């Protein structure tokens, strides 16, 4: 087995890795950089570009349906037309919604002169992929590649979002466990990750938030308590709250949290507005409720009270207290969260509560770091920020202690850390060596091949 990290690199956030197993080649992930436009967002193929013979691609494994992990799949599938696409049914259903939407927005941006490149795929290309998708069940051990009969793959629940999985890769007695995005503890709707039952030889692990002491000390219950108190305070003065969220995963977790806080009377019965896409995805969460591992299998989003925000029809109505749970999480200019923020920021009774990560350079990061009274630039309209701004942690990634717990359970001889935020990978490796001094540790570097065949 040999492994090459292709992304993310230091300044490009598209996830893509290559795993060679015997005669077979697997692409792990197929992401776009969500902060980039057009072709610049595509993952960089690095050595795969120049040495196609050395890097056959028999299958593209999708771990989950976040854009930075799968939105380049139509492009990569066209480049390797014989590769199958392996993912869970929920991941494919979510990916299909996201890909069609992305293709439409990209085409519109090109026509409006707002994208530098013409869209590389359209909804019809996404539909055509359907025939190449092989749906996998979590826990099912499969031998997907005819030319390499010794290769077995088992997807296991990654606990990150609906449908997400990690992969156990077995070949000639060697066992490798690969996590893309993994969450070891239960969130509010979905349960925590499942790991292989026996020890493995190699763990290839994400490290996204391993740098953060706040994540390490995080108690979800305390964070929900803090959010409830803050919401009560804003509602008491008649203010409204904006929570910028990604459509998939965080939006549904927060929708559930708000619903249960209202039901228990811990926050007033404020109207909650969600984006149309997040609401469609919530219906998919309902569709898979009984087949997925859920904390409350009987809970259904369609039984909760929400309003779908249609900005073009309704505008932003701030009469009375309201909660806006709307995209984009990064508050990209003209997105729903950006438009709601433009109405909220000048008035001190309103609030913006961040419930997820904001990338450096994003408008969300600027707002998050602003002081009261700072001017925020809404595409030329400069408004003073007087509204309240708070950050809450509702991570869907394992913290450092949770990653260490996973390593302890899997007892690998070797741990390879994939880069995360800041110095996450180095922190994970150092702490893992502290836990087990005999453990061989390595940092995956972009474009550098690691031979994982030996201990
Ligand atoms: Zn993710």
Image: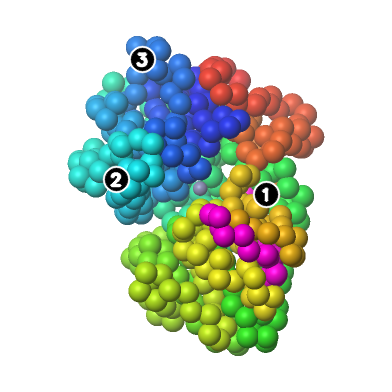
The residue depicted at 31 percent of the width and 37 percent of the height is 118
Q: Position of residue 376 (x, y in %)?
A: 64, 58
- Which quadrant of the rendered structure holds the C terminus? top right
Cβ of mark 1 under 8 Å from ligand 1: the answer is no
Give the distance between the C-alpha atoms of the residues marked 1 and 2, in whole angstroms: 43 Å
Question: Could you tell me if residue 446 is visible in this image?
Answer: yes
**Disc with the residue nearer the chain's start (3 vs 1):** 3
Give the distance between the C-alpha atoms of the residues marked 3 and 2, in whole angstroms: 34 Å
Asked if residue 334 lies in the magenta stretch, the reply is no
In the rendered view, would you say 394 is above or below 41? below
**Disc with the residue nearer the chain's start (1 vs 2):** 2
Q: Quadrant of residue 342?
A: bottom right
The residue depicted at 39 percent of the width and 76 percent of the height is 314
The residue depicted at 50 percent of the width and 82 percent of the height is 271
Q: Position of residue 163 (x, y in %)?
A: 41, 53
Query: Viewer-nearest of labels 3 and 1?
Result: 3
Q: Which element is circle 1 on?
A: loop
Q: Position of residue 278 (x, y in %)?
A: 42, 64
In the rendered view, would you say 154 is above or below 443? below
Q: Are marks 3 and 2 in contact (CB under 8 Å)?
A: no
Q: Position of residue 440 (x, y in %)?
A: 69, 24
Front residue (pair 325, 19): 325
Give the distance between the C-alpha atoms of the residues marked 3 and 1, in whole angstroms: 37 Å
Crowd tier of the residue under label 3, counting other residues whose Cα lies within 10 Å: few below 14, some 14–19, many 20 or above: few
Cβ of mark 2 under 8 Å from ligand 1: the answer is no
| Residue identifier under label 2 | 111
| Residue identifier under label 3 | 52
Circle number at residue 178: none
Asked if residue 390 lies in the magenta stretch, the reply is yes
| Residue identifier under label 1 | 399
Point out the stretch of residues depicted in magenta. Answer: 378-399
Cβ of mark 3 under 8 Å from ligand 1: the answer is no
């Amino acid at each position: 087995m040999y492994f090459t990290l292709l992304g993310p690199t230091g300044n490009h956030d598209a996830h893509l890795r290559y795993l060679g197993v015997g005669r077979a080649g697997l692409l792990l992930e197929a992401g776009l950089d969500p902060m980039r436009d057009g072709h610049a967002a595509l993952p960089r193929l690095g050595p795969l570009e120049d040495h196609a013979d050395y890097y056959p691609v028999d299958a593209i494994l999708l771990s989950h349906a976040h854009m930075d992990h799968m939105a380049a799949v139509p492009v990569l599938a066209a480049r390797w037309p014989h590769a199958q696409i392996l993912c869970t049914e929920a991941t494919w259903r979510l990916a299909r919604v996201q890909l069609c939407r992305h293709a439409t927005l990209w085409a519109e941006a090109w026509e409006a002169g707002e994208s530098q490149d013409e869209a590389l795929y359209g909804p019809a290309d996404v539909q055509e992929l359907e025939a190449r998708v092989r749906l996998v069940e979590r826990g099912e051990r499969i031998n997907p590649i005819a030319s390499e009969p010794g290769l077995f793959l088992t997807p296991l629940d990654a606990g990150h979002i609906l449908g997400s999985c990690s992969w156990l890769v077995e070949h000639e007695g060697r066992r490798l466990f690969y996590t893309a995005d993994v969450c070891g503890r239960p969130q509010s709707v979905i349960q925590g990750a499942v790991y292989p039952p026996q020890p493995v030889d190699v763990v290839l692990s994400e490290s996204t938030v391993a740098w953060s002491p706040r994540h390490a000390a995080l108690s979800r219950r305390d964070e929900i308590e803090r959010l409830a108190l803050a919401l009560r305070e804003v509602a008491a003065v008649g203010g409204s709250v904006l929570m910028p969220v990604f459509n998939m995963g965080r939006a549904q977790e927060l929708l559930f949290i708000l619903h249960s806080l209202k039901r228990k009377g811990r926050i007033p019965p404020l109207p909650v507005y969600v984006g149309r896409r997040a609401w469609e995805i919530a219906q998919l969460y309902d569709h898979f409720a009984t087949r997925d591992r859920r904390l409350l299998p009987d809970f259904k989003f369609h039984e909760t009270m929400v309003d779908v925000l249609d900005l073009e029809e309704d505008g932003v109505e701030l009469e009375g207290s309201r909660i806006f749970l709307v995209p984009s999480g990064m508050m990209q200019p003209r997105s729903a969260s950006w438009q709601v923020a433009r109405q909220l920021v000048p008035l001190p009774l309103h609030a913006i509560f961040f419930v997820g990560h904001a990338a450096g350079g994003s408008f969300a990061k600027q707002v998050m770091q602003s002081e009261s009274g700072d001017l925020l630039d809404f595409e030329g309209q400069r408004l003073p920020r007087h509204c309240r701004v708070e950050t809450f942690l509702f991570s869907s990634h394992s913290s450092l202690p949770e990653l260490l717990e996973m390593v302890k359970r899997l007892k690998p001889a070797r741990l390879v850390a994939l880069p995360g935020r800041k110095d996450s990978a180095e922190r994970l490796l150092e702490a893992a060596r502290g836990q087990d001094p005999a453990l061989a540790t390595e940092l995956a570097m972009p474009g550098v091949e690691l031979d994982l065949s030996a201990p």
